[in-house]
Amino acid sequence: MMIYAVKCPRCSKKAEAQMTAVGIKGTYCEPTAKLAASRITCGECGHVIDSSEAPTDKYELWFSSTLRGHRLWAVNESHLEWLIQWLSGDLDNSRLSLADRSYVEALPKWVLTNREDAVKSLQKMRTQG
Ligand SMILES: [Zn+2]
């Protein structure tokens, strides 16, 4: 099951969102599941939102910041770590999975031209985690 790190709408601390597939997005060649939150659980204040009947995309990602006017984000810890590694050049492109490769190809240009700043910004987000 896919878990996103989100901001609790009640106490603004880190909460977990259980994601569920609600359709398909992406290109014909690379269809990917479109995910929506079916349940948000906050370990800090105990707030629970059950939206399993109508999964929602109204959630705020925990790992999110702004870099040069753009939004830089990661859905959870492992995504964050992966991004830091990839942008730092620590991952071998030829060994990426198909999904990772299409993700990398879809990364906006401003991320690639500001790699160092993006890594710094992501590392800063990690310390908030
Ligand atoms: Zn909370």
Image (tube, rainbow, N blue to C red):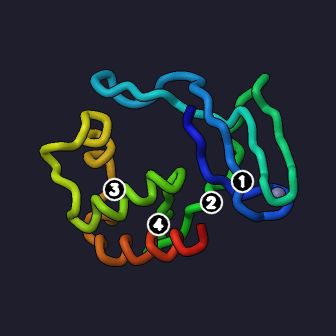
Q: Is residue 51 left or right of residue 115?
A: right
Q: Are marks 4 and 3 in contact (CB under 8 Å)?
A: yes
- Asked which quadrant contains residue 1, the reply is top right
- Disc 4 packing (10 Å; few <14; some 14–19; many ≥20): few
Q: Nearer the viewer, mark 4 or mark 2?
A: 2
Q: Are marks 2 and 1 in contact (CB under 8 Å)?
A: yes
Q: Residue at x 22, y 62 (%)?
A: 90
Q: Helix or strand or loop: what does disc 2 sit on?
A: loop
Say the numbered circle drawn on residue 70. Answer: 4
Which three-letter amino acid code belongs to the residue tagged 1?
Ala
The location of residue 10, given as percent across then percent down, is 86, 58
Say the numbered circle drawn on residue 62. Answer: 2
Q: Which residue is mark 3?
A: 108
Q: Nearer the viewer, residue 77 or 72?
A: 77
- Disc 3 packing (10 Å; few <14; some 14–19; many ≥20): few
Figure quadrant, ligand 1: bottom right
Label 2 CB-ligand 1 distance < 8 A:
no
Q: Mark 2 or mark 4, which is nearer the start of the sequence?
A: 2
Spatial CA distance of label 2 from label 3 is 20 Å
Quadrant of the image for the C terminus? bottom right
Label 4 CB-ligand 1 distance < 8 A:
no
Say the numbered circle drawn on residue 15. Answer: 1
